[in-house]
Structures are given as structure tokens and as C-alpha cells.
Image (tube, rainbow, N blue to C red):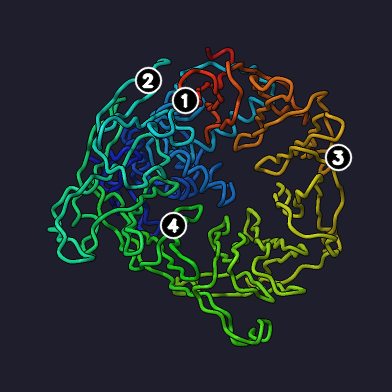
């Protein structure tokens, strides 16, 4: 029995749905110092119930408490909390969507504790990611070990990005779950699923939501007579390497209030803690785990304008939309979801002078796109630039910026207007938020405009030199006073001078391929003479901020960085069956670490979010089977000493 501590408790579940015993939540005002004198075993037990913030708060209570908590993950927690909000959200999403990664981390000896509790997973993963990056920078030798492959059939197999789990369709509504084990695909379970539901938007390796075929009689022309007891959704989870059905949800469980109780699409949040169930054109629901680990309805999406949706980076906000109607949903501390915005974008009356003949356009004539800022504090809506032949021509286009008001309701905060020289029915216009959410770059057909968030939380135009052309892709550097613009056959570095003025500082020539690392530290491009140039930003020392070129005497056709930006995979133009893995050194140069060879032409490849594996898809057009023209293989990225 735990000692009396004057602490409040609640319950939670880990990423696999296992119940965590009551979580101890520290009440600083009522903290009783006597409990820190309990035996270490009891102390560790109490600490295992704490959240990341609780561990951090306890560590600051006293030197004695801090020292004792170092064996419970305090160092890992403090490092995690030192990261940006965007990086914290990314770490949460990666570890909470991968039970395999969580179990792998628990086998490593680099941490203060091996069997750390699941709620501290994001902190331990962030610590592991830093450790792995440092090993590569220090020149650790790598090798690529094949872990399995499959002749991929698009109409029969469902593969969810980097996850080595395949849904293989059989007859009628029956499918098998196949998992990769020791180089072979092993059948783990047979499932029944509704083939008419789009359900591939699930990027977790330990849980799978399977919509069920439901046969219900029609009660009219547009309505079915649901009893609420029909089996609508099955939840399969991987426990100890085996996939088993853990839960069955009925039509009444998923849609308790709506009379429309069927599912068209499902979408799992990036952190794998919320599931969106959409009945297209009618309604929606959001499911989360309850305190007992079972999935329950935690919010209803009461809009029929739900053809598209997007989560914020922290998975705490959701927008569902269609054309110019947007419904915002937000998650409370108790994990329930409620509507926090109902936005209809239309022309403002004060702007009608900018429209042909001063006529207000119908809201249904808008085709709009959306994006959340990485810090989750702003939300932007802008015009889709896809050409539509019968679209109405306009003299101006705009970007709408929204933010929560003091009551948490999303409201239009600002509208940035771009006028055209002549009426057009499509116009390139796109906003780009910086990682910290305080810089907004808007590229248009004719210009590039920089906006900065001031201390009063208002967006103001920055002082900048005039851009000579429009469009282009924007990538942000690790330096908040720098960004990269990728244009046709060139890459330009923009910097903010000490005077506060933004301007172009360097331009690099690029030909057929240009890739920029996620952290904006590295640029890879082919030059006109057939070489591959890597421009690396020096992070420290007298040359900090300087871009240094490294040249390879060959051209590449494909390139991709891992999420951390310290691994780079290339496919040479002279050998399309070969993939070369490079690693970044502490000196800022790139060295070849490993390579792999396939029998076929490499089409695409992906690093897993944790950088432990790489998935390669190769094209095999002459194998005699018209259905099988793609081979998907998985490769482990290992240190040679760890084989």
C-alpha cells in the first residue's frame, strides 16, 4: 500500500491500452516532505505514476527529491521540456503511435531506468533521438540489414507507410493481418471489414480499427432503420506479438445521437489517441479511450460539411471542412471533444470594391485549403490554386488567419489580401508558418510577403526587400532569422539583418532535383554539369550560419532525409537499383555509411519516424504478373557493433 502523501490521483492507459495504476498528481501547496524518506523501492513506485510535468515539478521541490528522481527519469524529462513545442508534439506522436518503439527503448541501457512508465515515453524517446543523432555525428559505423520484402499488389494489399504490418484482402469482406517477423510475413489474424470504408489513415503499429459491414433495412428513401446495437467497428490490438480483437463497438456506441450511423472514412490522430469517424455529408464522431482502456464516444461532429479534415500537430484540435465551411473541434483536459469554431468564409462587404462589378460571391464558389501553425496557436485558410475551368474570375484573393479567443473559440483574427492585375479564376497563394509559429511567409503568384507576430500577438508586415518573382516552396532553417526559398532551378537564402530588414543573402543553382532537410540545415541539389552539391549550414564556431558546399561527382535521381536531418539516402542516376546512405559528421560533412542493392528500379523510399528502418519500393515491370509490379522491402539501420 502506498504511503499517505496528500496527493490527488487519477487513472490513464498506455499506448497499448493497458491500464496504468492511479497516476499521482502533485499538489504543490499540500506537499508532505515526509514521503521522500520512504525506502527507494516505494519511492520508485510512487514516481512511476507521475506524468512528465509532475516529475519536473517534483524535481524542483528540493535537492534531495531531485537527486532521488534522477533514477526515475528526471534527466530525460528535463531534456524533453527544454525542446520546442513543435518538437515535443513530434516526440509524443512518434512514441504514442509505436508500441514496438516503446518496447525497444525499454531494452536500452542509455537511460536512468529501463522499464520506464508509458506516460514518460515522449521524454525517453527525445533523449534516445538525441543520443542516436550524436552517435552518427561521432562517426558510428552503420549497416543496412534486410528484414523482409513482399510482392506488393495495390488492389490486394494495404500498407500504411513505414509500418511493417499489411492488410491482405482475400474473398468478400475477409482479410488477413500480416506482420513481419524474422524476415517472413506471418499471418496474425483474420478480420472482417467493410471494403467500402476508407480506413488507411491509421499510422500506429499496435492498433487497428476495422469498420464492419452492416446490413440494415431502409426505413425510407434516405434513412436506414438502425437499432443502435449493430456491430459497426472492431478494435484490434497487438499484445505480445499477437493481434487480437479487443473491442466491438455498436452503431449506438459510435453515433449515440445521430440517426445516420454508418462510417464512410476513419482517421487516427497523429498521437494515436483520438479516432475520427466520418459519415460523409452527414455527421461525425470522435472516439477516445475511457479510464478502463475501452474506446468510447468523446465528441460529436455536428456538421454535414465534412469531406476533408486536418489535425493540429499536437492532436488537440481538429478542423473538418468542405468548400468554405469550417468546423473546429478542440480537446479538453479530460480528453472530451467539443466544437470550438463554426466558420464560413465569404467576401467581406468592405472588400467588394475589389471584386468584378462589386458583387458578393456565393460561399459555395470558394475552394479553400487549411493549415495549423506548428505551435497550434493559429490556423490559416487560403484559396486552392487548382485550375477550374468554370470558376468565377476574381480581382483579389486572401489568406484568413484564425486564433482562439479568451474562451477558446476560434475566430477570424486577420485577413491578408492579395490583388491581381487582371481578374483570374485561379491564383497561387500559400501561407507558411515557421516552426515557432511567429513568422508567416506568404508566397503568391507575383511576390513573397513576410509577416511577423509582435509582442501583442498581432501579425504585422515585416521590413523586407522586394521579391523579384512569386511562387516557390518555403523551408525554415534552425535559425529563426533565416528561411530558404526553393524556386525553379535555384535555391535562395533569406536572412534578417541586424537592422531588422529581411533580404536575400545567397543563391545556389539547382537543376533537376532539390531536397532540403526538415531542420533546414542541409540543401541537396543537382547542378547543371551533372554533379550533386550539398550545402551545409555551419551551426557553431566562427563560421556559424555560413553555408559550405560539398560536391559529389555524380548526379542523383532521388533523395530523402530522415526526420532529424542527420541521415540522407540517395539513388544515383547511373545506378537506379542502388540506394546509398550518408550520415552527417560533427564537422558538418556527409560521409557514406552504408548502401543497399535491389533487383529492380527504386521508385521511392521512406525513413521510419524514429530512423530505425527504411522502406524501399522498387518497380518490377517484367516479372510476368501484371498485378505485381512493385516490390516493397524493409531494411534495419543498425550500428555494426549491434548486429
The location of residue 98, given as percent across then percent down, is: 42, 35
Question: Mark 2 against mark 4, which lies toward the viewer?
Answer: 2
> Quick one: label 4 or label 3, which is nearer the N terminus?
4
Residue drawn at the location 44% of the way across and 38% of the way down: 121
Neighbourhood count class around disc 3 (C-alpha, 10 Å): few under 14, some 14–19, many 20 upward: few
Q: How far is mark 2 from mark 4, CA to CA?
A: 36 Å
Residue annotated with mark 2:
185
Residue annotated with mark 3:
543
The location of residue 169, given as percent across then percent down, is: 32, 32
Q: How far is mark 3 from mark 2, CA to CA?
A: 50 Å
Neighbourhood count class around disc 4 (C-alpha, 10 Å): few under 14, some 14–19, many 20 upward: many
Neighbourhood count class around disc 2 (C-alpha, 10 Å): few under 14, some 14–19, many 20 upward: some
Left or right: where does residue 35 sit relative to residue 402?
left
Neighbourhood count class around disc 1 (C-alpha, 10 Å): few under 14, some 14–19, many 20 upward: few
Residue annotated with mark 4:
316
- Which quadrant: the N terminus? top left
The location of residue 56, given as percent across then percent down, is: 48, 47
Question: Mark 2 against mark 1, which lies toward the viewer?
Answer: 1
Residue annotated with mark 1:
626
Q: How far is mark 1 from mark 3, CA to CA?
A: 55 Å
Callout 2: SS: strand
Callout 1: SS: loop
The location of residue 19, given as percent across then percent down, is: 26, 41
Say if mark 2 contacts mark 1, CB within 8 Å: no
> Quick one: label 2 or label 1, which is nearer the N terminus?
2
Callout 3: SS: loop
Amino acid at each position: 500500500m502506498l504511503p499517505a502523501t496528500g496527493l490527488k490521483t487519477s487513472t490513464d492507459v498506455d499506448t497499448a491500452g493497458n491500464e496504468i495504476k492511479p497516476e499521482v498528481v502533485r499538489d504543490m501547496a499540500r506537499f508532505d516532505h515526509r514521503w521522500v524518506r520512504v525506502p527507494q523501492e516505494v519511492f520508485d513506485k510512487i514516481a512511476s505514476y507521475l506524468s512528465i510535468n509532475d516529475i519536473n515539478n517534483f524535481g524542483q521541490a528540493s535537492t534531495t527529491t531531485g537527486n532521488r528522481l534522477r533514477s526515475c527519469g528526471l534527466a530525460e524529462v528535463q531534456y524533453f521540456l527544454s525542446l520546442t513545442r513543435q518538437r515535443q508534439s513530434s516526440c509524443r506522436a512518434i512514441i504514442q503511435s509505436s508500441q514496438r518503439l516503446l518496447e525497444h527503448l525499454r531494452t536500452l541501457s542509455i537511460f536512468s531506468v529501463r522499464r520506464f512508465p508509458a506516460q514518460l515515453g515522449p521524454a525517453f524517446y527525445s533523449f534516445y533521438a538525441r543520443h542516436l543523432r550524436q552517435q552518427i555525428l561521432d562517426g558510428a559505423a552503420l549497416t543496412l540489414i534486410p528484414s523482409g520484402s513482399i510482392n506488393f499488389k495495390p488492389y490486394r494489399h494495404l500498407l500504411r507507410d513505414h509500418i511493417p504490418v499489411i492488410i491482405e484482402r482475400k474473398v468478400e469482406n475477409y482479410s488477413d493481418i500480416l506482420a513481419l517477423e524474422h524476415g517472413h510475413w506471418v499471418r496474425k489474424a483474420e478480420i472482417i471489414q467493410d471494403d467500402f470504408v476508407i480506413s488507411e489513415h491509421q499510422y500506429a503499429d499496435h492498433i487497428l480499427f476495422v469498420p464492419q459491414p452492416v446490413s440494415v433495412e431502409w426505413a425510407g428513401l434516405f434513412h436506414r432503420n438502425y437499432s443502435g446495437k449493430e456491430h459497426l467497428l472492431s478494435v484490434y490490438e497487438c499484445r505480445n506479438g499477437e493481434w487480437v480483437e479487443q473491442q466491438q463497438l455498436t452503431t449506438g456506441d459510435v453515433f449515440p445521437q445521430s440517426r445516420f450511423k454508418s462510417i464512410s472514412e476513419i482517421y487516427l490522430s497523429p498521437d494515436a489517441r483520438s479516432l475520427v469517424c466520418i459519415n460523409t455529408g452527414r455527421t461525425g464522431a470522435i472516439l477516445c479511450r475511457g479510464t478502463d482502456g475501452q474506446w468510447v464516444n468523446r465528441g460529436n461532429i455536428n456538421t454535414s460539411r465534412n469531406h476533408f479534415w486536418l489535425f493540429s500537430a499536437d492532436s488537440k484540435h481538429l478542423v473538418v471542412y468542405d468548400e468554405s465551411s469550417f468546423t473546429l473541434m478542440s480537446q479538453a483536459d479530460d480528453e472530451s471533444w467539443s466544437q470550438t469554431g463554426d466558420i464560413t468564409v465569404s467576401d467581406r462587404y468592405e472588400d467588394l470594391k475589389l471584386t468584378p462589378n462589386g458583387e458578393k460571391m456565393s460561399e459555395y464558389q470558394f475552394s479553400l485549403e487549411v493549415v495549423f501553425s506548428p505551435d497550434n496557436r493559429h490556423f490559416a485558410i487560403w484559396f486552392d490554386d487548382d485550375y477550374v475551368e468554370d470558376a468565377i474570375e476574381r480581382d483579389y484573393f486572401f489568406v484568413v488567419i484564425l486564433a482562439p479567443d479568451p474562451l477558446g473559440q476560434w475566430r477570424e483574427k486577420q485577413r491578408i489580401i492579395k490583388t491581381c492585375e487582371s481578374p483570374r479564376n485561379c491564383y497561387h497563394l500559400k501561407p507558411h508558418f515557421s516552426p515557432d509559429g511567429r513568422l508567416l511567409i506568404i508566397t503568391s503568384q507575383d511576390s513573397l510577403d513576410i509577416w511577423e507576430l509582435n509582442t501583442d500577438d498581432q501579425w504585422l508586415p515585416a521590413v523586407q526587400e522586394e521579391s523579384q518573382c512569386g511562387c516557390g516552396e518555403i523551408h525554415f532553417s534552425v535559425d529563426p532569422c533565416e528561411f530558404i526559398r526553393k524556386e525553379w532551378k535555384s535555391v535562395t537564402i533569406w536572412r534578417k539583418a541586424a537592422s531588422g530588414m529581411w533580404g536575400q543573402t545567397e543563391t545556389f543553382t539547382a537543376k533537376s532535383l532539390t531536397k532540403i532537410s526538415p531542420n533546414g540545415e542541409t540543401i541537396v541539389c543537382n547542378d547543371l554539369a551533372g554533379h550533386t552539391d550539398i550545402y551545409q549550414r555551419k551551426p557553431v564556431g566562427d563560421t556559424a550560419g555560413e553555408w559550405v558546399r560539398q560536391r559529389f561527382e555524380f548526379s542523383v535521381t532521388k533523395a530523402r532525409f530522415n526526420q532529424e536531418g542527420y541521415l540522407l539516402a540517395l539513388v544515383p542516376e547511373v545506378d537506379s537499383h542502388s540506394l546509398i546512405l550518408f550520415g552527417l559528421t560533427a564537422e558538418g560533412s556527409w560521409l557514406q555509411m552504408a548502401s543497399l542493392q535491389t533487383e529492380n528500379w527504386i521508385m521511392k523510399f521512406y525513413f521510419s519516424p524514429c530512423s530505425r528502418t527504411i522502406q524501399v519500393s522498387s518497380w518490377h515491370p517484367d516479372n510476368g504478373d501484371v498485378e505485381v509490379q512493385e516490390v516493397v522491402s524493409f531494411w534495419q539501420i543498425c550500428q555494426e557493433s549491434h548486429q
